[in-house]
Image (cartoon, rainbow, N blue to C red):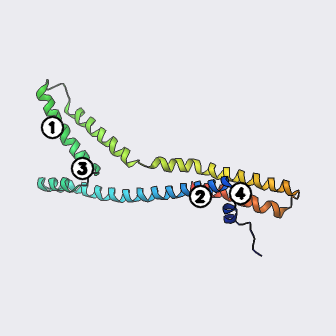
Amino acid sequence: MTSNTGFWSSVTQGDVVTLSVALLLLTMSVLSWVVLIVKLMEGWRERKMTQRARAWRQMSPPERQNWRLQASPDDPYAELHDLGLTAVRDLHALRRQTTPRILDESDWITRQLQCGLDRCWLRAQRHLTILASVGATAPFVGLFGTVWGIYHALAAIGQSGVASIDQVAGPVGEALVMTALGLAVA
């Protein structure tokens, strides 16, 4: 005789709330793994870009120009390189139009590069809010599933009128699995 008290049977035979909690936890888990894989791939690409950028100092001017042409559009080092060159070019144009001492060269270039660094930093932090949201809410979603399962277990006990351990242990144990799933997802 097969038992009908397994976790998967309770999820598949559960009500809308139980199914929703299980589906939400599954979705949160999949999203977390996708973000993790994407971030690992981005880190690998950025390590390669860093190695290429470190070799820039030993390059001749024609090699440096070639390096810039071969860089990908989202290469942060190439972007900062272009920003620095543009900042110097714009500064010289501004100095031709105004009094030469109005703008300090160091401050101007530093501000332009800081704006570029901020944009690169924001790109590097993409999708981390998903991980933070999942990590913060998954335990509570699992706890909600547990409370819902215990409520249904107690309601079933109340309807049957018998409170034996075999009637309590199965449903409550299945309900506690939701908390474990929520913690595992987080």
The vertical placement of 152 against 97, above or below, is below
Q: Name the residue under label 2.
A: 184
Name the element at disc 1: helix
Residue lying farthest to the right in this orientation: 161
What residue do we see at 26% from left, 37% from top? 112
Q: Is mark 3 on a helix, strand or loop?
A: helix
Residue at (23, 55) in percent of width and height: 71
**Residue of label 4:** 175
Mark 3: amino acid: Ala
Kindly indicate whether the residue at mark 2 contacts the one at mark 4 (C-beta within 8 angstroms).
no
Q: Is residue 144 in view from this perspective? A: yes
Q: Position of residue 84 (x, y in %)?
A: 21, 42
Residue 120 is left or right of residue 183, and the answer is left
Q: Residue 160 carries which label?
A: none
Q: In which quarter of the image is the C terminus?
A: bottom right
Q: Circle 1 sits on which residue? A: 89
- The mark nearer the N terminus, 1 or 3, is 3
Q: Nearer the viewer, mark 4 or mark 2?
A: 4
10 Å neighbourhood of mark 4: few (<14), some, or many (≥20)? many
**For residue 98, what is the image quadrant?**
top left
**Left/right of residue 56 with respect to residue 166 in the rendered view:** left
Give residue 126's position: percent from left, percent from top.
41, 48
Q: Which of marks 3 and 4 is nearer the N terminus?
A: 3
Classify mark 3: residues with Cα within 10 Å, few (<14), some (14-19) or many (20+). Answer: some
- Label 3 to label 4, Cα distance in Å? 53 Å
Residue 78 numbered tag: 3
Q: Which residue is drawn at 44% across and 49% down?
A: 127
Q: Does label 3 or label 2 sit earlier along the sequence?
A: 3
